[in-house]
Amino acid sequence: MKQVHVAVGVILVDGKVLLAKRADHQHQGGLWEFPGGKVESGESVESALSRELLEEIGITIDGCEPLIDIAHDYGDKRVLLDTHVVRSFSGTPEGCEGQPVEWVPVSELAQIEFPAANVAIVDAVLALAE
């Protein structure tokens, strides 16, 4: 089974993180996630993250810093989540693909329903915020 390489953005501003809800028809649909998307062949993680965040939520990032890499096997799909923190961007985040987006206080992340692979990201964000 092929592994899907995904660039993930933890968009962190004033103690809040931007989350997007996965469409019901998607893998792990109906759950909240940190925005991002597939890294294309020959593309850097930073380029993929920049492209995906512009496409998905309409923001242009001013840079990012690595947070955590997570390899996870769902049984029907394997993912490598290459997660970066974004603290500065231009534009106003919105669900460009019709998905709900919401700013959530970091302190409330533990109560949100995420795909299993995202649990380690939540832990890393909580540790970052301490």
Image (cartoon, grey):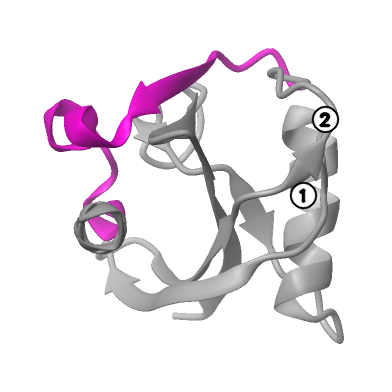
- Please determine whether, in this image, residue 106 is positioned above or below residue 38: above
Label 1 CA crowd tier, 10 Å (few <14, some 14–19, many 20+): many
Q: Nearer the viewer, mark 1 or mark 2?
A: 2
Is residue 40 or residue 25 the one in the foreground?
40
4 left or right, relative to 111: right
- Please determine whether, in this image, residue 86 is positioned above or below residue 32: below
Does the segment drawn in magenta span residue 114?
A: yes
Q: Secondary structure at mark 1?
A: helix
Identified by mark 2, the residue type is Gly
The image quadrant that residue 70 belongs to is bottom left
Which range is magenta? 97-118
The image quadrant that residue 47 belongs to is bottom right
73 left or right, relative to 44: left
Question: Could you tell me how many numbered marks the image carries?
Answer: 2
Identified by mark 1, the residue type is Glu
Label 2 CA crowd tier, 10 Å (few <14, some 14–19, many 20+): some
Which residue is under mark 1? 52
Q: Earlier in the sequence, mark 1 or mark 2?
A: 1
The image quadrant that residue 71 belongs to is bottom left
| Tag of residue 90 | none
33 left or right, relative to 60: left
Is residue 111 or residue 78 the one in the foreground?
111
Residue name at image x 84 percent, y 38 percent: 55
Which residue is under mark 2? 58
Q: Give the farthest residue toward the bottom.
A: 42
Q: CA distance from mark 1 to mark 2?
A: 9 Å
Asked whether the beta carbons under mark 1 and mark 2 sit within 8 Å of each other, the answer is: no
List x then y, in percent, for residue 57. 73, 30
List x then y, in percent, for residue 77. 39, 64
